[in-house]
Amino acid sequence: MREPIETYFQMGTIQWMSYPGEPVLESLRKILCDDFFSAVEVCQAADDDTRKAMRDMLAQSHVKVCYGAQPRLLGPGLNPNDIVEENRLKAEKTLLEAIDEAEYLGAKGIAFLAGKWKEETKEEAYSQLLKTTRNLCAYAATKKMNVELEVFDFDMDKAALIGPAPLAAKFAADMRTACPNFGLLVDLSHFPTTYETSRFAVRAMRPYITHFHIGNAVVMPGKEAYGDQHPRFGFPDSANDTEQLLDFFRVLKEEGFFCPEAPYVLSFEVKPWNKEDHDIVVANTKRVIRRAWALLEE
């Protein structure tokens, strides 16, 4: 493509994935000082002082702020589709708090994920997730904010209720009947974990997609970084590299997601493995993005 990728997408990264274990303010500043990024995804702050400092930095940056509520659920093991109502309410409570924190930080919405499930109670869990998500959307609507559900694997690592892609599309259709501020967040790194291609997954979910992630995964059992670990592009025995990212870009172009007048956020969710250098892994990802984009046909 002759046009830069920034013409069509707001390029971002997930702060807590790109710089795990690093001081939040230090790593956030590093991202905000890098003009490759026009978006950043942040999560729950450790305390009020950190939260205020984050808000002040973000306000100066001219960067789109996105808020990931996934760590609020994964850390304490909360499940928004728990069939035990008391437990479901605990998950809903932290997600409602996430909407407030996201608003404070300058984000226009939150993203979260479904919880674990069992085959014998799948329909009940689906109803519970609808209940939670509708309540979140109703509250977010009072603030003119959006709610996004990230589509995950259903039997490999996170084993979340939503996906694969057809079930995610069904859930999104059920949500959109009453909640126009709901959308799906889809991640290239999750397609191998749901046994789907980019073309199949994007086409299945197309009307409901509002946000993109890209990354990599190892889906060969017994291999290093197996599961939903988001290793760098080119990691041994992994599923995605330049060729797969190029294919993803082709699909997005074909399906009408190149929108210069209202660019979608396209963030990379790539995490250093073991003792890998954070900055080198970030640079690796940028190189792969630029190469795949350069190879994309006009």
Image: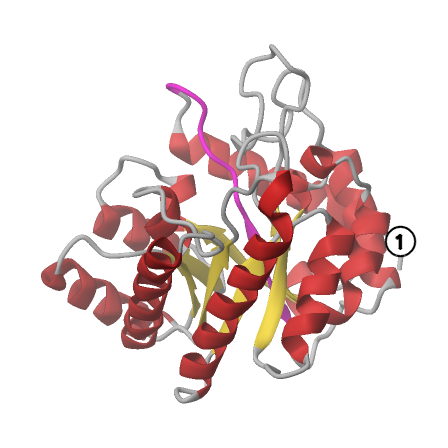
Inspect the magenta stretch and tell me whether residue 93 lies in it: no
Q: Main secondary structure of the magenta part?
A: loop
Where is residue 244? Give x, y as percent. Answer: 77, 37
Q: Nearer the viewer, residue 149 or 31?
A: 149
State the residue lying farthest toward the top: 222
Q: Which residue is mark 1?
A: 297
Instruction: Identify which residue is drawn at 48% across, 38% down.
Output: 282
243 with respect to 123 (left or right) = right
Q: Nearer the viewer, residue 85 or 252?
A: 85
Where is residue 137? Give x, y as percent. Answer: 49, 77
State the residue lying farthest toward the left: 49
Instruction: Identify which residue is drawn at 82% across, 44% down.
Output: 247
Span highlighted in magenta in the image: 263-275
290 with respect to 113 (left or right) = right
103 over 47 or under it: above or below: below
Q: Quadrant where the C terminus lies?
A: bottom right
